[in-house]
């Protein structure tokens, strides 16, 4: 994927989130539905986060410079942390308001427009979420993954809003509207925590998953009997770039030239498996 294409995906998300947010705010205010307004808050957070992505994805794709010699890949994870904070904060505020409405009671509301906008938003959000998830998988971007997460969680939030308003329409009781809002808000907070966990792990240089480190071990084993093993394996990921460091234990009778050839062969194999931008640092030790 080109540098500009990932940002274009984020810009598309901004445009769609703007339309959905405005539609839900208008319908929520006209009908008095707290569930629709909660879904509007969710979309407003999506809009804010998509805007953040446009900036941070551009920053993450900048090449290394004098002040950032390892590149700017962690801007991707930093974007995820900021998004999680905004999403979680918004969810907690809506949860508190919804609980207060459950206790104090709500005035009679007009349910049908809210049902229509919730169902329409569900369809649009599903399509956009699947599109962004595909782009995130292609690029390995946490920021786009978080963005996709927002819109796919809208399936739940819009469904909850629609179901709550259908129950209001069928039973004549407005109790279901703030209850739906509470459920939406708690779900928002839960999903925010998941995004925060993934982003924080990358910022703290968490190692690659076991299955990926097993692939590194397999690549080392493929070098043959001249390589006796390895030590000090360290891995991490910053944005789309994988960093791998290790000490390679080589038969002491192997020449310097052959040792260099084995090292280069391993670097090429790791870049084939993990991507051409993979950064590999290998020290060789006689064993």
Image (spheres, rainbow, N blue to C red):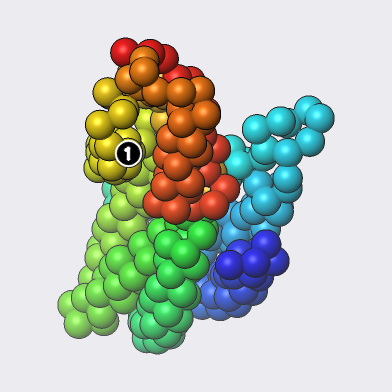
Q: Position of residue 287 (x, y in %)?
A: 31, 13
249 sits left or right of 238 in the view: left
Residue 206 place in picture, x, y as percent: 40, 29
Q: Is residue 285 above or below residue 100?
A: above
- The image shows residue 45, relative to residue 6, as above or below, that is above
> Front-most of 5 and 195?
5
Front-most of residues 174 and 213 = 213
Could you say where residue 196 lies in the image, as x and y percent from the top left? 43, 38
Q: Quadrant of the N terminus?
A: bottom right
Vertical placement of residue 224 versus 233, above or below: below
Tell me if I can see residue 38 in this picture: no
Q: Residue at x 30, y 66 (%)?
A: 156
Taking the view exactly as shown, the residue that stands out farthest to the right is: 66
Q: Nearer the viewer, residue 268 or 204?
A: 268
Residue shown at 39% from the left, 82% from the top:
123
How far across and down, in percent of the image, does residue 97 sit?
Answer: 42, 48
At 58% from the left and 75% from the top, the residue drawn is 16
Q: Which residue is mark 1?
A: 223
Question: Residue 10 sits in which quadrant?
Answer: bottom right
Q: Is residue 228 visible?
A: yes
> Does residue 159 appear to the left or right of 2 in the view shown?
left
- Packing grade of label 1 (10 A; few <14, some 14-19, many >=20) is some
Query: How many badges with numbers are in the image?
Result: 1
Residue farthest to the left, as pictured: 171
Residue plotted at (57% across, 48% down)? 277
As helix, strand or loop, the secondary structure at mark 1 comes to loop
Residue in the foreground of this view, choosing between 194 and 204: 204
Residue 232 sits in quarter = top left
């Amino acid at each position: 994927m080109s540098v500009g294409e990932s940002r274009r995906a984020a810009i598309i998300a901004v445009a769609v989130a703007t339309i959905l947010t405005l539609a839900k705010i208008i319908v929520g205010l006209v009908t008095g539905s707290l569930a629709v307004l909660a879904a509007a808050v969710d979309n407003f957070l999506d809009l804010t986060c998509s805007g953040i992505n446009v900036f941070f994805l551009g920053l993450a794709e900048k090449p290394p410079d004098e002040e950032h010699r390892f590149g700017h890949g962690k801007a991707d994870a930093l974007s995820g942390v900021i998004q999680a904070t905004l999403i979680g904060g918004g969810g907690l505020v809506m949860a508190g308001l919804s609980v207060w409405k459950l206790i104090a009671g709500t005035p009679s509301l007009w349910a049908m427009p809210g049902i229509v906008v919730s169902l329409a938003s569900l369809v649009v959000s599903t399509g956009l979420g699947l599109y962004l998830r595909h782009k995130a998988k292609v690029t390995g971007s946490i920021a786009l993954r978080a963005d996709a997460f927002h819109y796919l969680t809208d399936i739940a939030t819009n469904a909850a809003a629609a179901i709550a308003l259908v129950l209001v329409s069928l039973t004549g009781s407005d109790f279901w509207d703030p209850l739906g809002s509470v459920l939406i808000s708690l779900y928002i907070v839960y999903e925010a925590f998941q995004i925060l966990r993934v982003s924080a792990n990358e910022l703290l240089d968490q190692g690659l998953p076991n299955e990926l480190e097993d692939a590194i071990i397999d690549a080392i084993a493929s070098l043959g009997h001249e390589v006796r093993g390895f030590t000090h394996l360290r891995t991490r990921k910053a944005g789309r770039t994988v960093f791998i460091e290790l000490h390679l234990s080589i038969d002491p009778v192997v020449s310097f030239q052959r040792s260099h050839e084995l090292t280069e062969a391993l670097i090429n194999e790791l870049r084939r498996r993990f991507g051409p931008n993979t950064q590999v640092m290998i020290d060789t030790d006689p064993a």
